[in-house]
């Protein structure tokens, strides 16, 4: 039976229409990325820590992405990087040509009641984290406090830099969950100002201080015992501090451990990189591999060491699991954590 010319033409047109699409889907990552530009977005202005990490990674990751695309860094600051997080989730291309870096705590903002966070972070395409951040609480040597246990009975005055900053949130959580007595003196412009305040005797400690920053800016204080490191705040200990207790180990109930885990899970996302949801699986795999290959690149590591940037990477699959697990938290735990983080007025 012969088909009419009309039917034959219709079938042929349909086949031709499908071929380009099929060819596009069949592209390897190398074929897709060849000749393209990949944008690395930064949720902050130029010059800050996130920007420094992003620009350094961008200088090397292109040679590790199949097809060797051109990599360009762009800044989209605003709302503590939530502007970029929202854009990655809702607006920017999902084809693997755009990824970025946002605040390590941004992924958890929706869980903790931040209405400005218009995304479900468990659905992002997580590429990796450049360092597994460990923060510490320290006491100045004249405070008389040498262990975290002493803060259950004796007040430690710590400097704060803002309601949403680690310097304020971390001691607030430890107080609320474990019962320590850390008094937060707010209003310091930045972490360095808190350190200077310790020297001047205005405060007797600093909590929520990145260990990498301690080593790069105040190592002599640690070496000369001007500061006592009381506790580590992360999901795991830093190899430099094997004898300093981990905050999770101080929890006495499952609820306490759940709250502490929810808050300090962000530490593993010290310098997180993520792409929009829905990036094709093979391209996401290629980006994740390129990221980890960059983390091992001798030239990258040499430049990072020169800039005193800590590189303790976590791969994208592990980061994704950390975020997915956080989003499975009992809503009652999330609500209680949100209440503990609120600033009393």
Image (cartoon, rainbow, N blue to C red):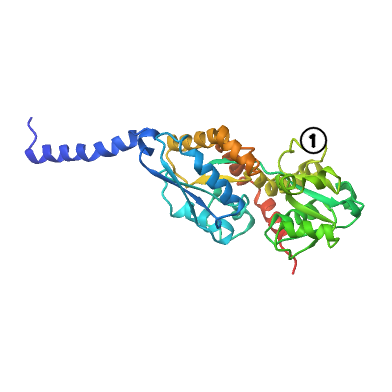
Give the residue drawn at x 82%, y 40%: 244
Label 1 element class = loop
Is 327 in front, or is 121? 121
- Identify the image quadrant of residue 133: top right
- In this picture, residue 142 sits left or right of residue 160: right
- Quadrant where the C terminus sits is bottom right
Is 265 in front, or is 115? 265
Q: Label 1 belongs to which residue?
A: 242
- In this picture, residue 333 sits left or right of residue 179: left
- In this picture, residue 314 sits left or right of residue 208: left
- Quadrant where the N terminus sits is top left
Q: Is residue 236 visible?
A: yes
- In the rendered image, the vertical position of residue 128 relative to residue 343, given as above or below: above
- Identify the image quadrant of residue 156: bottom right
In the image, residue 29 lies at what x, y percent?
Answer: 40, 34
In the image, residue 35 lies at what x, y percent?
Answer: 35, 40
Q: Is residue 124 visible?
A: no
In the image, residue 148 lies at what x, y percent?
Answer: 85, 47
């Amino acid at each position: 039976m012969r088909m009419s010319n009309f039917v034959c033409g219709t079938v042929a047109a349909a086949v031709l229409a499908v071929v380009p699409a099929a060819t596009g889907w069949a592209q390897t990552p190398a074929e897709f990325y060849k000749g393209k530009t990949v944008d690395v977005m930064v949720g902050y202005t130029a010059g800050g820590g996130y920007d420094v990490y992003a620009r350094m990674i961008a200088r090397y990751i292109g040679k590790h992405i199949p097809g060797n695309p051109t990599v360009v860094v762009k800044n989209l600051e605003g709302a503590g990087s939530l502007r970029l997080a929202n854009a990655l989730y809702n607006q920017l291309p999902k084809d693997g040509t755009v990824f970025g870096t946002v605040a390590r705590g941004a992924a958890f903002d929706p869980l903790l009641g931040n209405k400005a966070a218009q995304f479900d972070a468990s659905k992002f395409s997580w590429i990796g984290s450049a360092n597994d951040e460990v923060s510490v609480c320290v006491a100045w040597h004249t405070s008389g406090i040498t262990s975290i246990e002493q803060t259950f009975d004796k007040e430690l005055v710590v400097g704060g830099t803002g309601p949403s900053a680690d310097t304020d949130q971390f001691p607030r959580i430890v107080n609320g969950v474990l019962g320590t007595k850390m008094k937060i003196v707010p209003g310091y412009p930045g972490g360095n100002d808190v350190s200077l305040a310790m020297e001047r005797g205005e405060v007797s400690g600093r909590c929520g201080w990145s260990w990498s920053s301690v080593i790069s800016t105040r190592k002599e204080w640690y070496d000369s015992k001007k500061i006592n490191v009381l506790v580590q705040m992360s999901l795991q200990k830093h190899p430099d501090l094997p004898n300093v207790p981990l905050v999770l180990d101080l929890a006495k109930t499952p609820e306490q451990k759940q709250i502490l885990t929810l808050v300090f899970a962000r530490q593993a996302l010290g310098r997180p990189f993520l792409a929009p949801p829905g990036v094709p699986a093979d391209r996401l795999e290629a980006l994740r591999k390129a990221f980890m290959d960059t983390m091992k690149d001798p030239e990258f590591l040499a430049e990072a060491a020169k800039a005193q940037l800590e590189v303790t990477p976590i791969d994208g699959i592990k980061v994704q699991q950390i975020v997915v697990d956080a989003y499975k938290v009992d809503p009652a735990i999330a609500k209680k954590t949100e209440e503990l983080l609120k600033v009393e007025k």
